C-alpha cells in the first residue's frame, strides 16, 4: 500500500523482498542485533520500501506523522529550521539508521526535515503496523518497543550533550 507522503517516489515493494540486505545492515553493533532472522523477517513483512532520488524531502518538519523510516541505502540530511529562513543540517544518517521514531510513538509533528543527500532507499514502518505486531506477535512487539525506547533514549542523550554548552552559558 503506498503512503501519500511518498506518492511521487518509486515503490520498491515489501521489505520482505530485501530481507538479506536488511539483515546485513543490522549485524552487530546495531539496535536490531538481538533480533533473530525470523523476527527480522516477520518485522519486514510489515514494512514497505521506497526509492528516492537525491534532494527528495522524505520527512517535513511540522508535518504530522505516524511512521518511521529505516534507511537502507544512501544518506539523508536531517535539517532543522533555525530562525527566519535559516536552516541547519543537524545530522546525516545512513544505512541502518532510523528516522521519525518519535512521531511513530506519539503521532506528533515532525521535529525536523529529512532530505536525501543522494539516491536513497528506505523502509516505512507505521504506527498501525506496530499495533498489529503488538496484537499478533506480542513477544516481537515488546522487543520492538524496547528497541524504540532505546533509540529515543540515545537521541535524547545526544541532544542533551549538544545543548549542554548553551545551557551552561545561559546559567552563568
Image: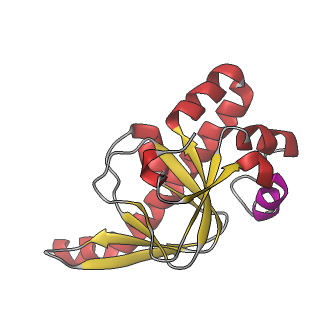
Specify the quadrant that holds the C terminus: bottom left
- Total number of numbered labels? 0
In this orientation, which residue lies closer to the viewer: 85 or 58? Answer: 58
Applied colour scheme: secondary structure
Rendered residue at 72%/60% (across/down): 30
Identify the image quadrant of residue 26. Answer: bottom right
Q: Position of residue 64 (x, y in %)?
A: 33, 45
In this orientation, which residue lies closer to the viewer: 168 or 76? Answer: 76
Which secondary structure dominates the residues rendered in magenta? helix
Residue 172 seen by the camera: no
Q: For this view, does 53 lie left or right of residue 4?
A: right
> In the rendered view, would you say 12 is above or below 149?
below
Q: Specify the farthest residue to the left.
A: 84
Rendered residue at 82%/63% (across/down): 24
Specify the quadrant that holds the N terminus: top right
Rendered residue at 52%/60% (across/down): 9
Q: Position of residue 115 (x, y in %)?
A: 44, 70
Identify the image quadrant of residue 142. Answer: top right
Q: Position of residue 19 (x, y in %)?
A: 81, 52
Q: Position of residue 73 (x, y in %)?
A: 66, 69
Asked if the stretch drawn in magenta spans residue 21, the answer is: yes
* First to last magenta residue range: 19-25
Q: Specify the farthest residue to the top.
A: 135
Asked if the stretch drawn in magenta spans residue 127, the answer is: no
Amino acid at each position: 500500500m503506498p503512503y501519500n507522503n511518498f506518492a511521487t517516489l518509486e515503490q520498491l515493494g515489501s521489505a520482505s523482498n530485501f530481507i538479506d540486505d536488511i539483515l546485513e545492515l543490522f549485524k552487530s553493533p546495531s539496535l536490531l542485533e538481538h533480533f533473530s532472522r525470523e523476527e527480522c523477517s516477520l518485522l519486514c513483512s510489515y514494512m514497505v520500501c521506497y526509492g528516492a532520488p537525491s534532494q527528495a524531502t522524505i520527512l517535513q518538519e511540522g508535518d504530522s506523522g505516524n511512521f518511521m523510516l529505516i534507511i537502507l541505502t544512501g544518506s539523508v540530511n536531517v535539517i532543522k529550521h533555525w530562525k527566519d529562513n535559516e536552516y541547519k543540517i543537524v545530522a546525516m544518517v545512513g544505512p541502518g539508521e532510523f528516522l521519525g521514531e518519535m512521531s511513530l510513538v506519539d503521532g506528533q509533528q515532525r521535529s525536523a526535515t529529512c532530505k536525501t543527500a543522494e539516491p536513497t532507499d528506505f523502509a516505512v514502518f507505521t504506527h498501525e503496523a506496530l499495533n498489529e505486531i503488538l496484537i499478533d506477535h506480542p513477544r516481537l512487539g515488546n522487543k520492538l518497543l524496547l528497541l524504540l525506547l532505546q533509540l529515543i533514549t540515545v537521541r535524547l542523550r545526544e541532544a542533551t550533550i549538544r545543548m549542554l554548552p548553551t545551557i551552561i552559558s545561559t546559567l552563568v
